[in-house]
């Protein structure tokens, strides 16, 4: 019998689950965060979170008003993020390495009452804030944050919250337009944490977590902040960009047991000179999500390091991962099984269920589904239907219950009247010894018919011709799936701020 789904009381605040429950469990003296040589305990985290909550209320925060967090991966991210939630605010987070124009968009979209801004982002953010018609109080992390936090505010009590109150806007990756905020309630994140991180994956109090993806990305907010905090584990944070060398160093130094990564970073770590690779024997598993993991990349990682890759898929709309491999049950090439607590179905374009093994559009249902997209009625009506998330992603499920990602519906190529998955063609080309990375998009030929076009980056000092790569693909795929053209790029393929290849940009440039 499956365990009962987690239930939450009506009066509820998610900061209590992730922060203050550790104090109640007697873990106040345990290390919560390791950062730049400091070990920060759960008692210190809880104290700073409550200070932020009270300072916000004392400063005029009203219930359910937005608070924007724009900081590097540092303890203040946790203090500000959980503190705003505890105060009764609705929290959003954005990349601290954006240009002023992007911050202008987010400020006008979010209309935050308060914003926590990293000192490294202050110039660009300040430029955008100066042009915004919506007033906000800016607190500079690394600047006036400590002084602001030290002001007396003990009498200012946080606003009470309920489990169904809005708590977080998670921004979509923006692959089909400007990023929108998926609105989540206080209980959504604790629900997924319980059924996925704790029950399905087995995150443990003894774990030490570290992440390449930065905390502003909901994927890492889960794996490297909420998940470890939910069980009283320890997270390692660092401000700088996640180079392979830095990650090898920190994993070895802190004996990390759980590592969050993405395929692009996995590839970079494999390309690091052997002499610079460190001991990863402490890592019991590595998460991979954010983009499709090529089978050959999975195989090369396993051969090089022997660390199991837990590949899965989640979304801003579901908060986190809902289909996943798990420790002891990894099927390379698949995304694993459906996480208990979620329902899924595959439908064709007419809305009919597809046969097992056939490709269809994924519909997902679960208690962590977003309520709507803020200020986006049509998008909400199209993708959020009565508790179902209509993802736009194409999947197939095999007879054993393992799920396989075939790409986004708008990425599929109809060649010769038959749909072609770009990922299948990319995985084939990635197995060629000369190919470093590639992206396949649809391009119309002289007759107006759509055919696969591959944009390829070769490995350093490697060589391959268009004819050679097309022939290579035809030997391994149905002929209609092979690229009709190959274009070579001397520069790395463009990516968005979630480190996903920007297919939309490549198609505009090449197709």
Image (cartoon, rainbow, N blue to C red):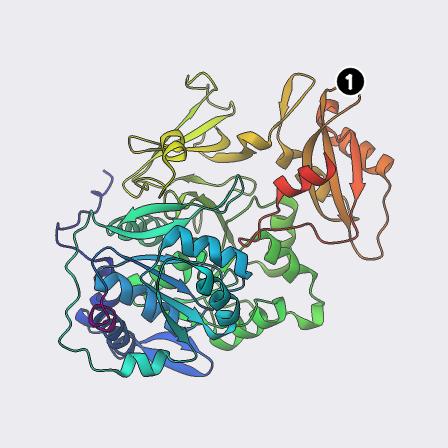
Q: Residue at 37% across / 48% down in the picture?
A: 319
Q: Is residue 286 visible?
A: no
Q: Is residue 342 visible?
A: yes
Q: Residue at 56% across / 40% down in the picture?
A: 333
| Segment tinted magenta in the rendering | 55-60
Residue 438, given in percent of the width and then of the height, sits at 70, 44
The prevailing secondary structure element of the residues shown in magenta is helix
Q: Residue at 46% across / 35% down in the picture?
A: 402
Residue 480, given in percent of the width and then of the height, sits at 72, 23
Q: Is residue 168 above or below residue 340?
A: below
Q: Secondary structure at mark 1?
A: loop
Residue 459, given in percent of the width and then of the height, sits at 78, 54
In this rendered view, identify the residue nearer to me: 13 or 236: 13
In the figure, is residue 221 to the left or right of 359?
left
Q: Quadrant of residue 80?
A: bottom left
The residue that label 1 is drawn on is: 447
In this rendered view, identify the residue nearer to me: 451 or 432: 451
Residue 219, given in percent of the width and then of the height, sits at 44, 54
């Amino acid at each position: 019998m499956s365990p009962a789904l987690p239930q939450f009381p009506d009066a509820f605040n998610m900061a209590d689950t992730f922060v203050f429950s550790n104090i109640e469990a007697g873990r106040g003296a345990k290390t919560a965060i390791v950062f730049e040589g400091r070990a920060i305990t759960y008692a210190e985290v809880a104290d700073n979170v409550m200070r932020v909550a009270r300072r916000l209320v004392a400063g005029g925060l009203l219930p359910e008003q937005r608070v924007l967090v724009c900081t590097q991966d540092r303890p203040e991210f946790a203090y500000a993020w959980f503190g705003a939630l505890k105060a009764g605010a609705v929290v959003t987070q954005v990349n601290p390495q954006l240009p002023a124009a992007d911050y202008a968009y987010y400020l006008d979209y979010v209309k935050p009452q308060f914003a926590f801004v990293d000192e490294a982002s202050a110039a660009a953010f300040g430029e955008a804030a100066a042009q915004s018609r919506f007033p906000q109080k800016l607190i500079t992390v690394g600047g006036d944050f400590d002084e602001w936090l030290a002001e007396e505010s003990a009498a200012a009590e946080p606003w009470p919250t309920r489990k169904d109150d809005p708590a977080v806007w998670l921004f979509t990756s923006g692959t089909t337009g400007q990023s929108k905020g998926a609105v989540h309630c206080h209980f959504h994140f604790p629900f997924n944490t319980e059924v996925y991180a704790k029950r399905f994956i087995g995150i443990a109090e003894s774990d030490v977590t570290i992440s390449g993806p930065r905390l502003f990305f909901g994927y890492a907010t889960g794996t490297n902040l909420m998940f470890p905090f939910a069980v009283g584990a320890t997270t390692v944070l660092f401000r700088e960009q996640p180079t392979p060398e830095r990650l090898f160093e920190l994993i070895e130094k802190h004996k990390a047991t759980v590592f969050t990564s993405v395929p692009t970073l996995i590839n970079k770590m494999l390309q690091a000179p052997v002499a610079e690779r460190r001991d990863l024997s402490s890592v019991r598993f590595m998460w991979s999500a954010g983009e499709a993991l090529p089978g050959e990349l999975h195989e090369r990682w396993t051969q090089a390091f022997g660390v199991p890759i837990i590949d899965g898929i989640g979304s801003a709309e579901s908060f986190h991962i809902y289909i996943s491999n798990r420790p002891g049950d990894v099927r390379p090439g698949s995304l694993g099984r459906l996480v208990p607590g979620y329902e899924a179905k595959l439908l064709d374009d007419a809305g009919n269920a597809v046969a097992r093994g056939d490709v269809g559009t994924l519909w997902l249902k679960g208690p962590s589904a977003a309520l709507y997209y803020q200020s986006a009625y049509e998008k909400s009506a199209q993708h959020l239907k009565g508790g179902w998330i209509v993802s736009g992603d194409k999947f197939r499920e095999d007879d054993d219950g393992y799920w396989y990602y075939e790409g986004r519906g708008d990425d599929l190529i109809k060649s010769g009247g038959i749909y072609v998955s770009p990922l299948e063609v990319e995985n084939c080309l990635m197995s060629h010894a000369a190919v470093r990375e590639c992206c396949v998009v649809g391009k119309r030929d002289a007759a107006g018919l759509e055919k696969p076009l591959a944009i390829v980056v070769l490995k350093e000092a490697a060589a391959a011709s268009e004819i050679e790569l097309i022939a290579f693909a035809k030997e391994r795929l149905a002929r209609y799936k092979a690229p009709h053209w190959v274009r070579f790029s001397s520069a790395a393929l463009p990516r968005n701020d979630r480190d996903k290849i920007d297919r939309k940009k490549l198609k505009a440039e090449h197709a």
